[in-house]
Structure formats: structure tokens, C-alpha cells
Amino acid sequence: TISFGATKDGATVALAQKDVTTKIDAALAMLKANNIDEKDIKTVDYSANPQYEILPPCYSGYCPGREQKIIGYSVNQMIAVKVRDTEKVGAILDGLAKAEVSNISGPDFTIDDEEAVKAEARELAIKDAKMKAKVLSKQLDVKLGRIISFNESGFYPMYDKSFAGNVMSMSAVPEAAPSPALPVGENKITSNVTITYEIR
């Protein structure tokens, strides 16, 4: 995700808006030329605020009421764009610079469908936990009964096993499902699950 914007001061809102619109339109045309889908381009802020004259300070004991006058307006527009093809990030940043927009921020690398990745990580963790529970039960010469509890946490690696009475808990951390590998690293979702079995 990359965000950018344009800000312009002018005597009227229309004059300031004209310059902002010109720069934003140039940036949007560049994004379209790079096949960025319209659904991935979003206006996150638009404002037009008056600018007031700065009154000189009053040092005397009596300061008569003075009214600030509007001397112009400041128009600002901010856009956020999601670039799904990370190979295009460099070209997008170069195009934004040529469009003379400002306040360029990013890229911020995120997982597009985080819930799907979480579900995949959870499934892998459950399979891993069950497999390790079977191995451990064989080593302990016990039989696994029904599952009596399940717990999931995430975002940090954890391995834990504990025994209490006639129950056995098994935690496992599988290989996390990463987002597409990028030169700056990768985003990972880790699911840590604890399955508690009855043992016989």
C-alpha cells in the first residue's frame, strides 16, 4: 500500500483545488497506465480549510477586539493505492514523483486476505498437533481418547506440553503460511494450537 497526496494554497478554494486536481489526475492516470484496478485506489482524506492572517501580538494592557481575516484557502487530498504486483512498486513510486504529488508514504507490505492465511495456518497447526500427540502417546504407552478442549493463539512461536491428571495437552507450531516473498522480507501468520485429549 502506498499513500500520496497534493496540497495547495490559493486565494480561493477553486484556485487551490485546480492545482491539487491537476496533480492528482496525473497520478491517477499513471496508476491506470500501470493497470492498477480502480477498486484499489481510494481517497482517504479531502479538505479545504481557510487560512487566516496572523495578527501582531498585543503587549499593552488594553487590546481591542480584532477580527482575523481570511487571506486564502488550503486544499489537501490524500490517496491510498494498493499495488498487488510488487514488481511494479518502483515504477509506481517513480510515476508519483513525476506527477509532482507530495506526502508519499510506503510501500507498506500487508497480507491481502489475512483470514484465509490464518485459516491455512490453523489447519496446518492442528494436523501437526494431532500427529505429535499420536507419537507422544505411543512413547508414553497410553491411548488417546476424545478431544476435550482446543485453544489457539498466534503471532509468536510456542511449543508447550503438559500433563495434569488423566489429560494430555499437545501444542504445535507448523511452518507458517507467508505472504509472497519480497526483497524486504515476508509477512507471516503463525497459529499456535493446544489440543487436550483424554488418555487411557
Image (spheres, rainbow, N blue to C red):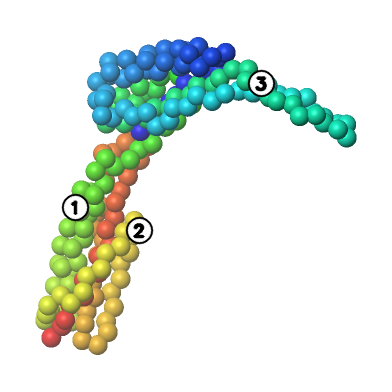
Can you identify the residue that label 3 sits on?
69
Labels 3, 1: front one:
3
Q: Quadrant of residue 5?
A: top left
Q: Is residue 10 left or right of residue 172?
A: right
Q: Quadrant of residue 41?
A: top left
Residue at the image position 29 percent from the left and 51 percent from the top: 189
Percent across and percent down for residue 83 are 30, 29
Residue type at mark 1? Glu
Residue at the image position 44 percent from the left and 24 percent from the top: 77
Residue type at mark 2? Tyr
Residue at the image position 78 percent from the left and 24 percent from the top: 56
Marked residue nearer the N-terminal end (3 or 1): 3
Q: Residues within 10 Å of mark 2 (few under 14, many from 20)?
A: few
Can you identify the residue that label 1 sits on?
120
In the rendered view, would you say 152 is above or below 15? below
Marked residue nearer the N-terminal end (1 or 2): 1
Residue type at mark 3? Lys
Badges 1 and 2: C-beta atoms under 8 Å apart?
no
Can you identify the residue that label 2 sits on?
156
Instruction: Looking at this view, name the residue that lies furthest to the bottom.
Output: 165
Q: Residues within 10 Å of mark 1 (few under 14, many from 20)?
A: some
Marked residue nearer the N-terminal end (2 or 3): 3
Disc tally is 3
What number is the disc on residue 105? none
Percent across and percent down for residue 164 are 27, 84
Q: Secondary structure at mark 3?
A: loop
Whether residue 82 is visible to the viewer of this picture, yes or no, is: yes
Q: Residues within 10 Å of mark 3 (few under 14, many from 20)?
A: few
Percent across and percent down for residue 175 are 24, 54
Spatial CA distance of label 1 from label 2 is 16 Å
Spatial CA distance of label 2 from label 3 is 57 Å
